[in-house]
Amino acid sequence: MGSHDTADDRSARSTRRTFLSASAAATAATVAVPLLAGPAAAGDAAPPAGPGHRIRPQAPDHELRELLRQVDQERIEATVRRLAAFGTRHTLSSQDDPVRGIGAARDWIHERMTAYAAASGGRMTVELQSYVQEPAPRIPTATRITNVVATLRGDTAPNRTYVVTGHYDSRASDVADAVGDAPGADDDASGVAVVLELARLMATRRTAATVVFAAVAGEEQGLYGSTHLARQLKAAGADIQGMFSNDIVGSSTADDGTRDPRTLRLFAEGVPTAETPAEATVRQSVGGENDSPSRQLARFVTDVADNDATGMRVRVIYRRDRYLRGSDHIPFLREGWPAGRFTEPHEDFAHQHQDVRVVDGRQYGDLPEFCDFAYIARVARVNGAALWSLARAPGTPRGAVIVTTNLTNDTTLRWQRGDEPDLAGYEVVWRETTAADWQRVIDVGDVTEATVDLSKDNVFFGVRAVGRDGLRSLAFPKPGS
């Protein structure tokens, strides 16, 4: 997102000025920023009048465009077909049969991840992350659950971590059927294909932060693998600043035959799953239902990945997930981390959770023939644009708060300075309370406090970090100090 002064901005500039008081780590400074009064907004189409410049999407640079150009549709198709060919990948299926069952799929994924890691110069490591799940819902006997996890260590901020998953287990009509065919092409070989392709492409590239690529198991039985992954990351003290689950991202065709090959849904919760009673009290007092960390993550995705380089429109859905369904982002939400679920625009339920069969001339079952491999490649580009931009930019500002101790008609924001070596400064962003996305941005420099001549009662604010190369972080507001 740039801060360019447009012709409309210049023509509407008023003489009123907004004073931004700011303090850096070692010095204090006062910055004067003009109030740019644009034309009256018509919905979200035009920004409102007020301080700052109209916000612009963060355009992909040459390096990102090259990464996205290298997404290989044929590799993605080969991955989906290979996983479907294991017959079933049910969590309770064979773990030692070399050609059929979840064990064979696990070993094949591990082999692919290991091959990609070999090209990373030691920066990517691969592990089989296993534990024994004792009898539980949908797990009748003690069962080994194994995630295949590739970790690409960041160069300068290795503890800051972003996670992308697809689940490699599958199911038939009966969730307890561990032997019948369950090819699971769309649900969820498609998501695993996205994860593997991004691991391949990013293994040879350097990032500031760490990226975890995980093929998780046990999703269909109750999110067991992703729950274990989240707990392991929590125990390791990882700073998870964003997580994406790719679950059912393989088809652009709805059950009525209509196609929407250029739209990808992103489910993002409002009120945080892990919200504390104290946080709920603040939210109920001043609002913020649409400003959860996951909603900020979704705004970031549309900012960097809804463009010509991905060929996709990202449709954000203001829900944690679909009705009666859930995916592998939920365990991360339970830990208090920003997370969202990517899924295709319209689903065909004849090709999900169905035995392979023909009824009245209609083919049921989750078969590769119903996947759109060009669509999956574009989904990979959306994920790639988001992960690359997050992992290369500075981290989300820490301790960002809106000061609410005084009754004033201006707004003071404070935050902690990050320690990234490429950190250039910060921007304050704001929007009308009825707007879905940030509308204006104010460049405040390398400071840790800013006061804007605009009432916090009337708009929503956020703070985001800016790197020397122009890459921005998520914006993060917290209504209280």
Image: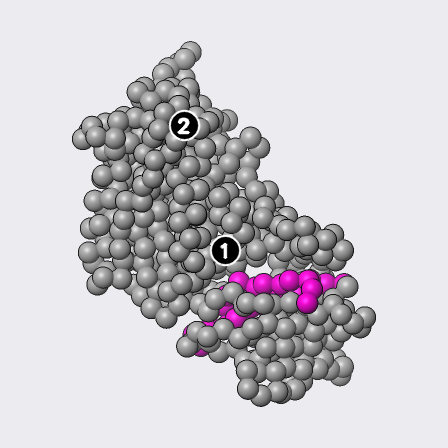
Label pair 1/2, CB-CB below 8 angstroms: no
Residue 154 vertical placement versus 141 (above, below): below
Q: Which mark is residue 135?
A: 2
Residue 313 location (% of width, % of height): 50, 49
Q: Is residue 305 visible?
A: no
Location of residue 371 (image quadrant): top left
Residue 78: say if magenta: no
Q: Residue at x 44, y 37 (%)?
A: 223
Residues 135 and 309: in front is 135
Exactly how many numbered labels are in the figure? 2
SS assignment at label 1: helix
Q: Which residue is mark 1?
A: 301
Residue 360 location (% of width, % of height): 42, 11
Residues 344 and 256: in front is 344
* Range of residues picked out in magenta: 458-481
Q: In this rendering, which labeled residue sits more in front, label 1 or label 2?
A: 2
Residue 241 vertical placement versus 410 (above, below): above
Location of residue 136 (image quadrant): top left
Q: Is residue 230 visible?
A: yes
Residue 373 location (% of width, % of height): 34, 40
Q: Residue at x 69, y 64 (%)?
A: 480
The amino acid at mark 1 is Val
Magenta-drawn stretch, dominant element (helix, strand or loop) = loop
